[in-house]
Amino acid sequence: MAEPRLRVTDAVGESWDDPSDAQIQRLFAGLNLSCPFLTMVRLDVPNDSQHYLQVALNDDLTMVLEYRDGGPAAHYRAEVPLQAEYGGEEIVVPVLLDWAARRPEWRGTLPWQQWDASREAPWQG
């Protein structure tokens, strides 16, 4: 059996290896204030903790995404000012699916800004 390439973990610690597009969409749809984030980690790179994409709900149900593509200099984040029910899902889900499939389109979807790695992300509490 082949080693998994991707692992998605939610805020309560449940994880899924190599999820399908439909699974990723369901996991996103299940985000709520009790389970406010998903982390997608690449397992097929030399240092998997350095290659991830996270999505988290803010208290107002808008979303923030963060990705790291290597070391601290390659750490970025972007905010989606729309709640999922008002169009945020149409922005975020394609980013998640494209990132998971290694399609480059996800990079141009949001205004990514370099993130100060010394600051804690809101979902790391």
Image (spheres, helix red, strand yellow):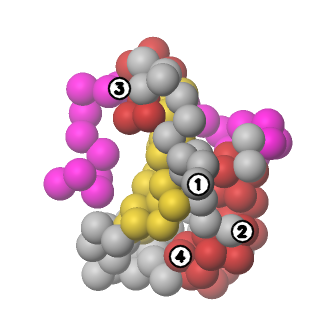
Q: Which of marks 1 and 3 precedes in the sequence?
A: 1
Tag 4: amino acid: Leu
Magenta-drawn segment: 103-125
Q: Does any portion of residue 55 appear in the rendered image? A: no
Q: Nearer the viewer, residue 71 or 75?
A: 71
Q: Earlier in the sequence, mark 2 or mark 1?
A: 1
How far is the residue under mark 3 from the one under mark 1?
Answer: 39 Å
Residue type, mark 2 in image = Asp
Helix, strand or loop status at disc 4:
helix
Measured Cα–Cα span from mark 4 to mark 3: 27 Å
The secondary element bearing badge 2 is classed as helix
- Tag 1 residue: 1
Q: Which mark is residue 27?
A: 4
Q: Is residue 79 left or right of residue 85?
A: left
Q: Are marks 3 and 2 in contact (CB under 8 Å)?
A: no
- The residue tagged 3 is 116
Which tag is nearer the camera, tag 2 or tag 1? 1
Residue denoted by label 2: 21
